[in-house]
């Protein structure tokens, strides 16, 4: 045992990480983990592991930094290109050749980090099958324990530097450019399924054709490597392949895998006979000395489970059917071939009741779920009733192994209960019918008597209704006359208003001076054509705008104070001359007169403005004309 394993403070830290965050690093190489943790402690100037554990308790966000240090996510596209070339030219074509055209191809990338390895597999498989067949047949399961890395992998967003190792032809075919990044094709991304998976605690993905775990095993100690490899052996099909990293060997596990191409670390599985043997191999990897005792106990438990009087199945955490007893096989027509199949692929998962969502609910609520009187149609006329109990199987308080589902046939009890209920209902119905017959006879006489009274009452009501209708007709005629009068008045007022508006517009057009009318909020209400000619803005551009927001040649800010005085009735008349620039860009002297708007409810001000030179010119012209007339 190394010094790292003897350090009680370091062991307490590992136990704390497992209990509080679900990361079990006890199977990793102690020297590697200790070195990575010590590196993080140095950046925080913490001297011992006990102090770092206290720091984690006070600052929970520190877990993220620690895991990023320990879980070294080093990966690239086509890393070790010669090995990937062998996979693309030899392994994948041979794997596909041995498959029927309708069979699914299942690949697992364990320890996928940020997803480059999984997308490399997708590109190589897509090149062989073609894009359409790839979407229909291929499932690539990519897993890691690092949630941050998985989030990045799901986005499939990479920089130009990240995809330097991708050949140009594949880069153009499988990546789309978004901004400064490259994104893997979305239609193919649906076939790559990312999820969190702990190789030590979670059940392996099964029925695999290719398992890729590159440079992941090297971080674990020898005992832990044996346990993981046993799970890999269980996960692979008999003709499946294992692809490891350049730094990994299987010299101590020749009973599980044999090398196919040792240079590139590609291995084939040593086939076992059946599922029971595969489970025993997993047990052997834990403790070789207890193999015989485990085998006997396993067979005893298997026989006890198989002969149970109630139909029962067991599904592991990854959704694979791992056990079913004789009652379940008979009840639901299951066969041994259905073992190790995804439960979602079986009819039982959704008929007679949708079980997949209930399984998730049992995991979430951490308690068994009971469903009673579930209906199952055996034929058009025959119905079966089942009581279903879904029980999550917990290995520890924080870890699930799977779920057990029991089906109890209660059809006989339901049918007996229904027969008793029908008999009771028939007796009650007979009694009610007798009582109602007597009541109906008594009621009939009363109804005959009351009918005559109702007829008389109805006649009176009809007469009263006729009178009300005549009254309403007169009221409607009166109302119609009132509405006609109001309509005539409105027409007269509209005509008068139109005349007034035309008169006002004529006055504004006749004036040879620019007129601007603003309200109390400085917003423009009137802007005549002379102002349009002076500043180059049409009325539809300024109407409702603040005069101080206009970008014209007139220094409108100098008018703010005079306009306020006018609105406040402090001054009745103000005039001034300002330097300005007209719409033609010519410097002018602008005459302005400001007066309050008087005699109406709306408060405001009237601004009169004119080009001084133009006015003088007009006056001179008029004087000359008057002199000519006098002469």
Image (cartoon, grey):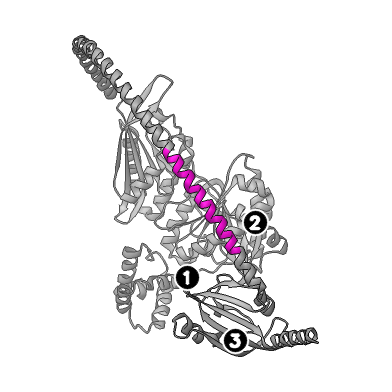
Q: Secondary structure at mark 2?
A: helix
Sort mark 2 into few (<14), some (14-19) or many (20+) by Cα contacts within 10 Å. Answer: many
Residue neighbourhood size for the residue with mark 1, other residues' Cα within 10 Å, grouped as few (<14), some (14–19), many (≥20): few
Number of the label disc, if any, that sits on residue 459: none
Please indicate, yes or no, whether residue 353 appears anywhere in the rendered image: no
Q: Which of 327 and 544 lies nearest the eye of the viewer?
A: 544
Left or right: 281 with respect to 390? right
Report, in whole angstroms, how far the alpha carbon at label 1 lies from the one at label 3.
29 Å
Q: Residue at x 65, y 75 (%)?
A: 511
> Is residue 302 visible to us here?
yes
**Marked residue nearer the N-terminal end (1 or 3):** 3
Which residue does the numbered mark 2 point to in the structure image? 123
Q: Nearer the viewer, mark 2 or mark 3?
A: 3
For disc 3, the marked residue is 555
The image shows residue 283 at horizontal and vertical percentages of 39, 50
User: For the residues carrying marks 1 and 3, which lies nearer the camera in this image?
Assistant: 1
Q: Residue furthest front?
A: 630
| Start-end of magenta stretch | 478-501
Q: CA distance from mark 2 to mark 3?
A: 68 Å
**Element at badge 1?**
loop
Tags 2 and 3 touching, CB below 8 Å: no
Residue at image position (80%, 85%) is 628
Q: Position of residue 93 (x, y in %)?
A: 67, 49
Q: Which mark is residue 600?
A: 1
Q: In terms of image quadrants, where is residue 246?
A: bottom right
The verdict on residue 479 being magenta is: yes
In the image, residue 629 sits, relative to residue 132, either above or below, namely below
């Amino acid at each position: 045992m190394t010094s790292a394993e003897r350090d009680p403070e370091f062991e307490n830290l590992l136990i704390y990480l497992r209990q509080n965050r679900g990361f079990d690093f006890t199977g990793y190489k102690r020297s590697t983990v200790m070195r990575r943790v010590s590196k993080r402690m140095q950046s925080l100037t913490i001297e011992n592991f006990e102090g770092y554990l206290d720091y984690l308790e006070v600052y929970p966000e520190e877990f993220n930094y620690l895991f990023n240090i320990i879980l070294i996510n080093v990966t690239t596209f086509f890393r070790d290109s010669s090995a990937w070339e062998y996979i693309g030219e030899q392994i994948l074509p041979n794997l596909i050749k041995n498959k029927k055209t309708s069979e699914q191809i299942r690949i697992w990338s364990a320890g996928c980090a940020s997803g480059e390895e999984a997308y490399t597999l997708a590109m190589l498989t897509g090149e062989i099958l073609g894009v359409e067949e790839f979407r229909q047949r291929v499932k690539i399961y990519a897993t890691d324990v690092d949630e941050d890395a998985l989030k990045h992998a799901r986005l499939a967003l990479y920089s130009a530097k990240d995809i330097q190792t991708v050949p140009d032809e594949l880069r153009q075919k499988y990546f789309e450019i978004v901004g400064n990044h490259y994104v893997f094709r979305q239609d193919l991304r649906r076939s790559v399924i990312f999820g969190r998976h702990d190789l030590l605690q979670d059940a392996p993905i099964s029925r695999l054709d290719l398992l890729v775990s590159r440079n992941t095993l090297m971080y674990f100690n020898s005992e832990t490597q044996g346990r993981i490899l046993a799970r890999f052996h269980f996960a692979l099909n008999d003709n499946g392949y294992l692809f490891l990293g350049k730094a990994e060997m299987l010299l101590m596990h020749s009973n599980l895998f044999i090398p196919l191409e040792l240079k590139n670390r590609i291995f084939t599985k040593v086939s076992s006979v059946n599922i029971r043997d595969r489970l025993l191999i997993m047990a052997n990897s834990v403790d070789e000395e207890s193999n015989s005792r485990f085998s006997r106990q396993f067979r005893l438990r298997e026989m006890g489970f198989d002969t149970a009087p109630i139909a029962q199945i067991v599904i592991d955490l990854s959704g694979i059917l791992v056990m079913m007893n004789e009652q379940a096989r008979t009840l639901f027509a299951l066969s041994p071939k259905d073992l190790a199949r995804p439960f979602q692929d079986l009819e039982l998962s959704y008929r007679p009741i949708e079980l997949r969502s209930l399984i998730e609910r049992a995991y979430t609520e951490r308690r068994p779920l009971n469903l009673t009187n579930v209906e199952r149609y055996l034929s058009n006329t025959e119905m079966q009733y089942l009581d279903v109990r879904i029980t999550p199987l917990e290995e520890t308080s924080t870890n699930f192994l799977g779920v057990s589902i029991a089906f109890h046939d209660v059809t006989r009890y339901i049918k007996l209960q229904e027969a008793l209920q029908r008999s009771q209902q028939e007796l009650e119905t007979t009694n009610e019918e007798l009582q109602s017959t007597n009541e109906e006879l008594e009621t009939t006489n009363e109804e005959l008597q009351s009918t005559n009274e109702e007829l008389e009452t109805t006649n009176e009501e009809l007469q009263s209704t006729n009178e009300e209708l005549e009254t309403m007709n007169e009221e409607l005629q009166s109302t119609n006359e009132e509405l006609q009068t109001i309509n005539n008045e409105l027409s007269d007022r509209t005509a008068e208003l139109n005349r007034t508006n035309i008169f006002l517009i004529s006055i504004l057009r006749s004036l040879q001076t620019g007129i601007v009318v603003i309200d109390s909020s400085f917003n423009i209400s009137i802007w005549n054509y002379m102002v349009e000619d002076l500043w180059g803005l049409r009325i539809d551009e300024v109407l409702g705008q603040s005069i101080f927001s206009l970008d014209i040649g007139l220094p409108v800010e100098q008018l703010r104070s005079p306009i306020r005085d006018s609105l406040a009735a402090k001054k009745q008349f103000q005039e001034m001359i300002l330097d300005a620039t007209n719409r033609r860009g010519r410097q002018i002297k602008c005459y302005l007169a400001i007066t309050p708007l008087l005699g109406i409810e709306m408060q405001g001000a009237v601004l009169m403005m004119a080009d001084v030179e133009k006015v003088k010119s007009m006056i001179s012209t008029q004087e000359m004309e008057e002199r000519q007339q006098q002469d």
